[in-house]
Amino acid sequence: MSRSERIAALVAELDAEVAAGLDDGALARLDPGTARRLVGVAGRCWAVAAEEGHDPPSGTDLSPTDAVVLATAALRSNDLNPFDLALWFSRSSS
């Protein structure tokens, strides 16, 4: 199994675990450090995909609320503001 296939399999497994954790409330007890690490990993993966010209996540991948919560947290964690985002948004093709 290639590295990309292994990552895809792990993501599918994680997706199922997160869905189950949402259903039974276990996700609310997840260590915030683990969630931050996961966001960082996903962000790095997406940055590579975006640079390769792949389509952005669709509305079925991430709800509008989740997208805004995540974007706000990412901006704040890097001491960025909406103006900075507008500059990047205008340069991005994805």
Image: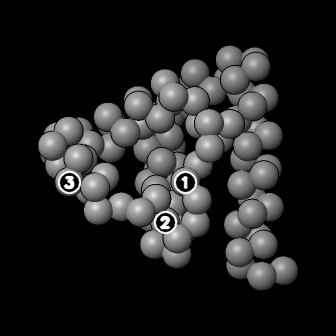
Q: Do the residues labelled 1 and 3 touch (CB within 8 Å)?
A: no
Judging from the image, what secondary structure is the residue with disc 2 in? helix
Dot 1 surroundings within 10 Å: few (below 14), some, or many (20 or more)?
few
Q: Is residue 45 visible?
A: no
Residue 87, label in figure: 3
Q: Disc 1 to disc 3, how far (Cα)? A: 18 Å
Q: Disc 3 to disc 2, how far (Cα)? A: 16 Å
Mark in front: 3 vs 2: 3
Write down the residue under mark 1: 56
Q: Relative to residue 26, is residue 57 drawn left or right?
A: left
Q: Is residue 40 visible?
A: yes
Quadrant of the image containing the N terminus: bottom right
Q: Relative to residue 30, is residue 23 drawn left or right?
A: right
Q: Which colour scheme is used?
A: one colour
Write down the residue under mark 2: 50
Q: Position of residue 65 (x, y in %)?
A: 49, 24
Q: Position of residue 10 (x, y in %)?
A: 74, 58
* Amino acid at dot 2: Ala
* Amino acid at dot 1: Pro
Taking the spot 28% from the left edge, 55% from the top edge, the residue there is 90
Q: Which of marks 3 and 2 is nearer the N terminus?
A: 2
Taking the spot 78% from the left edge, 72% from the top edge, the residue there is 5
Q: Which of marks 1 and 2 is nearer the N terminus?
A: 2
Q: Disc 1 to disc 2, how far (Cα)? A: 7 Å
Residue at the outermost bottom position: 2
Q: Do the residues labelled 1 and 2 touch (CB within 8 Å)?
A: yes
Q: Identify the image quadrant of residue 49.
A: bottom right
* Amino acid at dot 3: Leu
**Residue 46 versus residue 51: which sits nearer the camera?**
51
Q: Are marks 3 and 2 in contact (CB under 8 Å)?
A: no
Judging from the image, what secondary structure is the residue with disc 3 in? helix
